[in-house]
Structures are given as C-alpha cells and as structure tokens.
Image: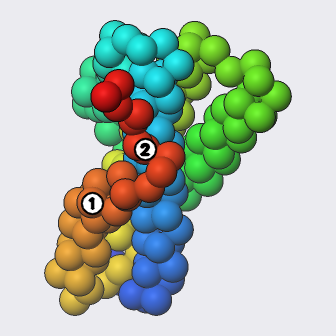
C-alpha cells in the first residue's frame, strides 16, 4: 500500500499576507537597530557604544543560527512566528517607554537589542519553512522570489534617509 502525500492547502494569497507582515516586522527591526546604534553614539560620542549595539544585533544570528534552525525544525513554525513577533514587539515597546520617560540607558540598549535580535533569529528560519509547508510546489518559485525580497528589501528600506538618523557634525 502506497501513501500519497497531501499537497499543502494554503494559497499564494495566504502566504503573501504572512510575507507582508513579516516584511513590515523585519523593516521595523532593521530601522530600530540602526536608530539605536546612532542614538548610543549621539548620547556618548563614542563609537564603542555604536559598535556594541551593532554587535548585539548581529551576535544571535551568527552564533546561534545553526542551533536555532534545529529547534525551529522541531517546533510549530506558526507558534514560533507569533511568539517571536510578540516578544520582539514587547522589547521595542519597552525601549519606547524607557526612552519617552527619560530612563533609557546604554545597558538597556545592549540587553534589549540582544533579545530582540534573538527573536528575529528564530523568525527567519521559521518563515522560510512556512512557504514550503503552505504552498504547492507550483508556487515555490514565486515564494522564493518573495523571500529574496524579504531578506534584501528590508536592508534597503530599513535605513531610510530621515532626520532621526542624521548625526550632527562638529563643524
């Protein structure tokens, strides 16, 4: 007796909806990371703080990436996406509250940037795997293009030309 594998029931429209949400989340993460690095530099006048914020942004993906992929393969990707989006959003809201109340310090940036980046490191492999689970094979090419735009597009759109990112010159 042969077992036929069932083709995924999701459509490209459902995938595009999730893709748009993840793209918006990724762009927000990139913008926040860059703004925080520049804020740290502006507050201290030292490049060390800027570099450390960028380090804590990149470290979770670099150091934990291979292990995160193994965990994501064992967990529900839907839950991983939802939980990580919520926790990353909570970290960003915490930063906003600390900033608006005047209590934001460099140590807060290091910790919250690390944890927000950690959640983003879980989101990426989960999101990539979702496409193959949701879509029939005939849509793999389209979803691959959308995933490429997801990865590269957030880097292009993330750091826009904005007064927030301008650093005052000493001239």
**What whole-number distance in Å separates the C-alpha atoms at marks 1 and 2?**
15 Å
**Residue occupying image coordinates x 35% and y 80%:** 135
Which residue is drawn at the image coordinates 44% and 55% (left, top)? 162
Q: Nearer the viewer, residue 82 or 113?
A: 113
Mark 1 Cα-neighbour bin, 10 Å: few <14, some 14–19, many ≥20: few
Residue 108, by quadrant, is top right
Q: Is residue 64 above or below residue 157?
A: above
Mark positioned earlier in the residue sequence (1 or 2): 1
State the residue in front, 52 or 169: 169
145 lies above or below 83:
below
> Foreground: 82 or 120?
120
Residue 35, given in percent of the width and then of the height, sits at: 47, 39
Disc 2 target residue: 165
Q: Can you say which quadrant of the picture contains the N terminus? A: bottom left
Image spot of residue 159 (x, y percent)? 36, 52
Residue identifier under label 1:
156
Is disc 2 placed on a helix, strand or loop?
helix
Which element type, helix, strand or loop, lies under badge 1? Answer: helix
């Amino acid at each position: 007796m042969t077992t036929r594998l069932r083709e995924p029931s999701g459509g490209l429209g459902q995938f595009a909806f999730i893709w748009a949400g993840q793209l918006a989340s990724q762009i927000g993460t990139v913008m926040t990371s860059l703004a925080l690095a520049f804020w740290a530099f502006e507050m201290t006048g030292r490049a060390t703080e800027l570099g450390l914020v960028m380090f804590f942004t990149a470290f979770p993906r670099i150091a934990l990436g291979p292990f995160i992929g193994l965990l994501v393969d064992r967990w529900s990707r839907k839950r991983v996406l939802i939980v990580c989006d919520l926790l990353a959003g909570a970290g960003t809201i915490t930063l906003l509250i600390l900033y608006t109340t005047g209590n934001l310090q460099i140590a807060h940036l290091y910790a919250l940037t690390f944890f927000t980046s950690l959640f983003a490191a879980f989101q990426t492999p989960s999101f990539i795997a979702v496409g193959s689970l949701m879509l029939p094979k005939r849509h793999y090419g389209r979803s691959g293009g959308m995933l490429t735009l997801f990865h590269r597009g957030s880097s292009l759109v993330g750091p826009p030309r904005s007064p927030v990112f301008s650093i005052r010159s000493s001239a």
